[in-house]
Image (tube, rainbow, N blue to C red):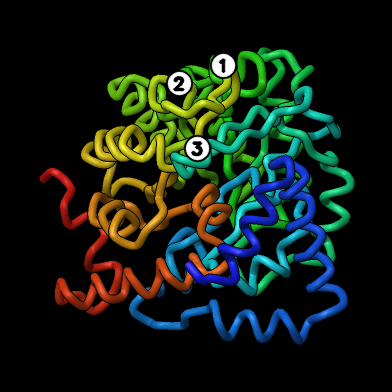
């Protein structure tokens, strides 16, 4: 982590977390619009182009395995700026059919001593119409773009599939894959939809509307047997991939003095929990679908371990905030060194090498 980012972080961390995020968003938007030369300069520093990291999966080319998880760029305003920072793919959203304000503030908290965050945002976003209009001038992009979609808070669970169907119809030509968010803890009763019967019907109907890959994101708080059952059902019903995992409401994981009794934990506090549920699912489903690891990944060693556990791709969010804009370069260069040390010529040779046979 550079001295410059340490200095910048000390300033950002004096701001309320949501304010700091807005400032960072404004900076990326400004750089993309007014300072394209700056983005080119940043890209030369951050982007690692090495064929050993490249994969052709999910109907796209991924130049490296590191993506930004859903929730960072909710309204697809930062895609140009984020594209210069070395990611292999980007996820925008979670967004909903209708605009919504999300939960009451404050709703974002730093657990600084644990390199973690607690959020209770509640799918705050500008709504499908505005985001669709914005994406119409962005897509296709130099990187694969995933649309993370959710239901509106006021949509009853019995009508939830209608929201997902609407969003798939509207954004089918504006993304390279869809991520189905049923696992956020910040929309009341949303996690209740993580049931086999609902997931079977959801994927059956969505696969009739789109040929784009559709990926399910699950909670780390599920019992492992339940997670395996849900993921197996999703894959049988047409899911093209599984993201493991979303944020956790297991507050016993944190000892921070800033811990709240609401919202989801992300960052290093959920690393072990996320690794354990990933291993459980991968041992059953590796080779049957694409697995994406998310949750507490903050260094190349952990990223590489998840790859060897069966992850074709990884996602970061909280570590990007704590470690700064060079993290993709650090992760990818570290993964390359680890691949070389193990004698692998391509990342595909390492994926799943440690999965239970």
Which residue is depicted at the point 37% across and 48% down? 291
Can residue 68 be spotted in the picture? yes
Question: Foreground: 57 or 7?
Answer: 7
Dots 2, 1 in contact, CB < 8 A: yes
According to the image, label 1 marks what residue?
261
Dots 2, 3 in contact, CB < 8 A: no
x and y percent of residue 2 in the render?
51, 71
Query: Taking 180 as reference, is 141 above or below it?
Result: below
Mark 2 vs mark 1, CA separation in Å: 7 Å
x and y percent of residue 327 in the render?
49, 65
Image quadrant where one finds the C terminus: top left
First in residue order: circle 2 vs circle 3: 2
Question: Foreground: 137 or 309?
Answer: 309
According to the image, label 3 marks what residue?
266
Can residue 242 be spotted in the picture? no
x and y percent of residue 117 in the render?
55, 38
The residue most toward the left is 357
According to the image, label 2 marks what residue?
251
Mark 1 vs mark 3, CA separation in Å: 14 Å
Which residue is depicted at the point 70% across and 34% down? 165
Kindly state the secondary structure of the residue where label 2 is placed: helix
Q: Quadrant of residue 312?
A: bottom left
x and y percent of residue 180 in the render?
58, 37
């Amino acid at each position: 982590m550079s001295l410059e980012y340490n200095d910048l972080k000390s300033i950002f961390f004096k701001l309320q977390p949501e304010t700091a995020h807005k400032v960072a968003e404004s900076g990326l938007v400004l750089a993309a619009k007014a300072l394209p030369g700056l983005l080119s300069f940043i890209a030369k520093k951050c982007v690692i182009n090495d064929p050993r990291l490249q994969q052709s999966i999910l109907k796209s080319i991924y130049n490296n395995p590191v993506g930004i998880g859903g929730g960072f760029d909710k309204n697809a305003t930062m895609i140009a700026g984020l594209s210069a920072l070395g990611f292999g793919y980007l996820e925008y959203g979670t967004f909903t059919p209708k605009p919504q304000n999300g939960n009451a503030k404050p709703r974002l908290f730093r657990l600084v001593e644990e390199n973690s965050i607690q959020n209770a945002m509640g799918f705050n976003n500008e709504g499908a119409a505005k985001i669709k209009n914005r994406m119409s001038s962005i897509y296709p992009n130099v990187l694969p773009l995933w649309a993370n979609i959710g239901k509106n808070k006021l949509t009853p669970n019995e009508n939830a599939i209608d929201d997902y169907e609407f969003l798939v119809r509207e954004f089918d030509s504006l993304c390279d894959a869809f991520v189905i968010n049923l696992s956020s803890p910040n929309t009341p009763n949303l996690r209740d939809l993580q049931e086999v019967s609902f997931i079977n019907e959801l994927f059956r109907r969505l696969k009739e509307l789109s040929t784009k890959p559709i990926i399910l994101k699950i909670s780390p708080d599920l019992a492992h047997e339940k997670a395996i059952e849900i993921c197996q059902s999703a894959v049988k019903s047409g899911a093209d991939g599984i993201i493991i995992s979303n944020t956790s409401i297991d507050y016993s994981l944190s000892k921070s003095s800033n811990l709240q009794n609401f919202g989801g934990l992300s960052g290093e506090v959920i690393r072990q929990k996320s690794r354990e549920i990933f291993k459980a699912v991968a041992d059953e489903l590796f080779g049957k679908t694409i697995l994406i690891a998310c949750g507490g990944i903050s260094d190349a060693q952990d990223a590489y371990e998840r790859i060897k556990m069966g992850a074709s791709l990884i996602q970061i969010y909280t570590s990007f905030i704590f470690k700064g804009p060079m993290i993709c370069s650090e992760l990818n260069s570290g993964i390359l060194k680890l691949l070389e040390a193990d004698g692998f010529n391509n990342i595909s040779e390492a994926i799943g090498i440690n999965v239970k046979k």
